[in-house]
């Protein structure tokens, strides 16, 4: 290969390279398979699937399953389709992402540029909160949401996702601001800028990349959440994932696989779009969650 | 009382005292350089003057006004940082005027001040650029502009030249010196580079281990270092230190050692003080700068106390203007600074001329200078 | 002239400085308050509940360790623990193996790396419910792979793991590996790209074969990536809930129950809140045993 000379020092023989390409392609197929199955079966009539044609291209192309999944399918007891639940998810995700990102940015700023005794321990406690099995908070959270009158509502879920998302957003901004030159903050202090002026005028204008990471991470996590949605908002206020699960698991009537697949793609579309548009940042977010600093 | 007073200032982090009892008084228009190896506390002291770090005990006053606990922006100081700390999202012009804006100066005045400073530093054509588009030298100028525009009482420089390449560093050094001469500002300047310290300062504070080792003019520091640390830290190549034994003979005092042929060498100490005379028979360190240890023809013609000894040359390092010659006297590695055309070759015995007027003596135990 | 008591040293700072001193803490406090109440307060509450006779609703009759001893006698819990061991063990090992292999292969100056990498990673962006739905029907013997093979003429082909009590847990592993192995690949790839090329060149000068280069030089340097991968995967494994719900619903029978689904069903559908709380506490302890040393080491190093 012409390019093999430059960066990596490792050279491989021809047979080895063929093998490597083969393996890589096989895995590409493996990763693509479920998406292919979902897409192809969401645009064919149910009879083609039950007739053993799951892997085949449709004989008859139809968007009917999509329409049905979106606006007609029976979710729970109502034949509303997934549409209202999609909007529930949007209403939940937007404020939760916005608030947790803003708070994370401020926290990260404080924890790196205004350090005080014990700040690392406090941060450790915030960070650990990201990794707890959420089963441990389900019971009291259900009670508290009940007391606050937020049970079953979108705002209740906003609160929940805000609380359990702050650790991650703080982690992102903290790691990002940790390498932001402290001399700039000192210079601004000497120039007479205060806490918020420094944040607003000096740090925030340079925070674009990490804000994108934080927003994408929070968006994906909150959109994809099932446990909190199922526990605290199972009825009309349910988010998309819960509604999709209800659709797929419903035991009444014929199983409309094509509608299920269409519904699954509908539920996956927002996060997939984000991934396609800003995959690079998405990956960076994943990495920051594991290899810090 | 000076213009900037540091009185008994100490700094501790928890139980650890990192800066011990610093007492420095700086007059208006002085250029004080804090020099020392990394970790000596010089930057901590500068940050304490700036108000970026608290003072643990003692006090710092500017123009007689106590500064302890006063916010950095209220001290009327300006600082140039090692990384320049230019705000990356603002243009050069905005960088320069940010401090004025924060202090509530009206736009027309800000623009005028900016124009003046830009003219002074010749950066007018850069005002609309972002820091990322500037070269190292240009950034350095902008950082100085940001400091100048505030017209502060004291300028603080934190290793401002260490990020520049060698050539530019020399140019900017001259530039800073010119600026100081023209504007007569009071400057406190931190560096680890002893040449910068020597060339720029009106006074130097040599620091090590959280202590001010010596405070004095560049000439005092260079010619009469207070102790072994200052002697070896300042000057390049550093001062030669030869272990000798003092021998009092009437009014004269001799420093006895051996050359590398195992022959006894007696170097008469120049104008020995009473202290030196009381040290008969003691082992001390004879300090002599490379330029006071030369070939006989290159020796200082005005000096009346040039002593010659014969010794073997081990290595020669021609540096163009001079030739540095390494040799071993009294068991110590020494470097002599000879004329570039001095007739020396490795392995050959040559004559070395000691200018004893420039020699100093140290007590090896206390490391302090005794003469 | 400044007149101060030298014994006091620093005089009282001016108002603005003092305010500046407090603002950061004020800004941080709402987040901290939320974390302390909703995380640590709730943990304490759940721990407390695990010692009470709570059933459908929290109640405060103290029963000591009874819930825990009941829990450990439940075959349902035992099944979910065994499943957890199988699932977590296979999931971590397989994800790490596939991730490392793909990363090493992708690091060979592969044409089209830019296309392959996102293909490997996109599953991570999906909800487990979506993943579960897709695999559920794909693995369903009635309409999925088995049926397809039959219509393609391979009539003896049989793949009914998802309906088989002995094998259903492996389908959960399959779907989970599908979802996360690409992410592990990305972690290892970042580790590989971070290795100094000069070391590799030096090793080649020393005559190391590719195999030895990886075995002796490169893989040992990936230690941090291995550690991070393990911690992330272990914690994801213990938290696995949605995937099981969507893929098998815990079945057939109890064949794919995990602690997370156990806790959920005991707490919310079987009205055994005390036992549910006890199981949640055990889950938390397990994760804490993995995460706390890791976080401690990470935060200490960063100083």
Image: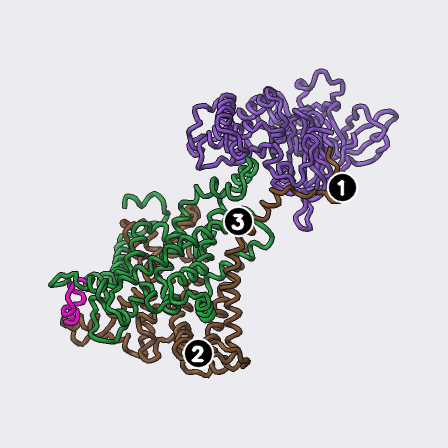
* Residue B47 higher or lower than A219, as above or below: above
Instruction: Where is residue A166? Give x, y as percent.
Output: 46, 56
The one of C179 and C23 positioned closer to us in this rendering:
C23
Does label 2 lie on the same chain as label 3?
A: no
Mark 1, Cα crowd under 10 Å, few <14 / some 14-19 / many 20+, is few
Q: Is A195 on the left or on the right of A165, as rendered? A: right
Eye-nearest disc, 2 or 1 = 2
Chain coloured purple in the rendered structure:
B
Report crowding for label 2: few under 14, some 14 to 19, many 20 or more residues within 10 A (C-alpha).
some
Q: Colour of chain C?
A: brown
> Which span of residues is magenta-colored?
A42-56
Local packing at callout 3 (Cα closer than 10 Å; few below 14, some 14-19, many 20+) is many
Give the x, y percent position of residue B176. Answer: 57, 25
Q: CA distance from mark 3 to mark 2?
A: 43 Å
Q: Are marks 2 and 1 in contact (CB under 8 Å)?
A: no
In front: mark 3 or mark 2?
A: 2
SS assignment at label 2: loop
Check if residue C146 falls in the magenta segment: no
- Please identify the quarter of the rendering in which residue A25 is found: bottom left
Q: Which residue is mark 3?
A: A110
Taking the view exactly as shown, the residue that stands out farthest to the top is: B302
| Label 3: element kind | helix
């Amino acid at each position: 290969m012409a390019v093999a000379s430059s960066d990596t020092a490792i050279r491989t023989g021809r047979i080895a390279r063929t093998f490597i390409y083969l393996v890589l392609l096989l895995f590409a197929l493996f990763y693509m398979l479920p998406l292919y199955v979902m897409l192809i079966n969401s645009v064919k009539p149910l009879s083609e699937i039950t007739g053993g044609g799951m892997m085949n291209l449709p004989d008859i192309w139809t968007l009917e399953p999509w329409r049905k999944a979106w606006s007609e399918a029976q979710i729970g007891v109502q034949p509303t389709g997934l549409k209202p639940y999609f909007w529930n998810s949007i209403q939940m995700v937007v404020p939760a992402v916005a608030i947790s990102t803003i708070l994370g940015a401020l926290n990260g700023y404080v924890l790196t540029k205004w350090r005080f005794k014990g700040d690392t321990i406090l941060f450790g406690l915030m960070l650990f909160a990201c990794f707890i099995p959420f089963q441990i908070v389900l019971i009291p959270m259900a009670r508290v949401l009940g007391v606050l009158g937020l049970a079953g509502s979108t705002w209740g879920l906003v609160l929940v996702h805000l609380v359990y998302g702050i650790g991650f957003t703080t982690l992102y901004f903290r790691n990002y601001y940790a390498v932001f030159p402290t001399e700039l903050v000192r210079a601004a202090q000497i120039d007479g800028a205060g806490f918020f002026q420094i944040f607003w005028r000096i740090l925030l204008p340079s925070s674009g990349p990490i804000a994108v990471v934080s927003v994408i991470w929070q968006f994906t996590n909150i959109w994809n959440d099932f446990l909190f949605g199922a526990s605290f908002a199972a009825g009309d206020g349910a988010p998309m994932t819960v509604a999709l699960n209800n659709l797929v698991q419903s035991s009444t009537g014929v199983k409309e696989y094509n509608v299920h697949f269409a519904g699954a793609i509908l539920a996956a579309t927002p996060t997939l779009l984000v991934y396609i548009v800003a995959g690079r940042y998405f990956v960076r977010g994943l990495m920051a969650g594991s290899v810090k600093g | 009382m000076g213009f900037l007073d540091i009185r008994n200032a100490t700094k501790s982090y928890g139980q650890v005292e990192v800066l011990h009892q610093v007492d420095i008084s700086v007059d208006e228009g002085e250029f004080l350089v804090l020099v020392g190896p990394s970790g000596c506390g010089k930057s901590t002291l500068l940050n304490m003057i700036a108000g970026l770090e608290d003072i643990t005990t003692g006090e710092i006053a500017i123009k007689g006004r106590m500064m302890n606990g006063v916010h950095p922006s209220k001290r009327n100081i300006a600082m140039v940082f090692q990384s320049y700390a230019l705000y990356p999202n603002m243009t050069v012009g905005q960088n320069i005027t940010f401090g004025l804006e924060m202090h509530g100066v009206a736009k027309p005045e800000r623009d005028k001040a900016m124009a003046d400073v830009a003219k002074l530093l010749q950066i007018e054509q850069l005002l609309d650029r972002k820091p990322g588009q500037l070269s190292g030298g240009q950034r350095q100028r902008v950082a100085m502009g940001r400091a100048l525009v505030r017209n502060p009482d004291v300028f603080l420089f934190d290793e401002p030249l260490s990020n520049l390449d060698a050539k530019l560093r020399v140019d900017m050094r001259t530039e800073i010196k010119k600026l100081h001469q023209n504007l007569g500002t009071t400057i406190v300047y931190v560096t680890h580079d002893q040449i910068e310290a020597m060339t720029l300062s009106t006074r130097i504070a040599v620091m090590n281990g959280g202590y001010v080792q010596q405070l004095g003019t560049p000439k005092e520091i260079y010619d009469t270092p207070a102790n072994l640390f200052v002697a070896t830290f300042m000057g390049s190549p550093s001062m030669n230190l030869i272990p000798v034994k003092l021998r009092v003979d009437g009014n004269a005092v001799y420093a006895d050692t051996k050359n590398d042929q195992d022959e006894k060498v007696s170097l008469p100490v120049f104008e020995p003080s009473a202290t030196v005379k009381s040290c008969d028979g003691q082992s001390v360190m004879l300090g002599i700068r490379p330029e006071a240890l030369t070939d006989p023809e290159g020796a200082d013609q005005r000096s009346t106390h040039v002593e010659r000894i014969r010794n073997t040359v081990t290595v020669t390092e021609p540096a163009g203007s001079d030739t540095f010659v390494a040799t071993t006297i009294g068991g110590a590695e020494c470097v002599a600074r000879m004329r570039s055309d001095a007739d020396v070759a490795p392995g050959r015995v040559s004559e070395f001329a000691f200018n004893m007027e420039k020699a100093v003596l140290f007590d090896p135990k206390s490391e302090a200078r005794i003469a | 002239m400044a007149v101060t008591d030298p014994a006091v040293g620093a005089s009282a700072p001016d108002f603005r400085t003092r305010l500046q001193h407090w603002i950061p803490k004020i800004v941080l406090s709402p987040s901290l308050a939320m974390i302390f109440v909703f995380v640590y307060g709730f943990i304490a509450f759940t721990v407390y509940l695990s010692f009470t006779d709570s059933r459908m609703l929290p109640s405060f009759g103290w029963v000591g360790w009874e819930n825990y001893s009941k829990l450990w006698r439940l075959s349902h819990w035992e099944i979910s623990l065994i499943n957890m061991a199988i699932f977590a063990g296979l999931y971590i090992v397989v994800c790490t193996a596939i991730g490392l292999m793909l990363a090493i292969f992708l690091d060979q100056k592969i044409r089209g790396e830019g296309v392959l990498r996102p293909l490997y990673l996109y599953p991570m962006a999906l909800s487990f419910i979506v993943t579960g739905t897709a695999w559920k029907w794909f693995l369903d013997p009635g309409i999925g792979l088995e049926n397809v093979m039959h219509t393609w003429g391979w009539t003896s082909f049989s793949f009914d793991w998802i309906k088989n009590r002995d094998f259903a847990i492996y389908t959960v592993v399959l779907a989970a590996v599908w979802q996360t192995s690409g992410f592990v690949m990305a972690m290892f790839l970042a580790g590989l790209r971070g290795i100094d090329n000069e070391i590799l060149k030096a090793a080649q000068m020393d005559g190391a074969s590719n195999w030895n280069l990886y075995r002796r030089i490169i893989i040992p340097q990936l230690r941090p990536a291995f550690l991070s991968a393990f911690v992330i995967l272990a914690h994801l494994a213990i938290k696995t809930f949605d995937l099981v719900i969507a893929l098998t619903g815990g079945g057939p029978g109890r064949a794919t129950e995990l602690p997370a689904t156990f806790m959920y069903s005991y707490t919310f559908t079987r009205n055994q809140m005390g036992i549910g709380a006890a199981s949640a506490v055990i889950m938390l302890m397990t994760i804490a045993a993995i995460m706390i040393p890791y976080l401690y080491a990470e935060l200490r190093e960063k100083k």
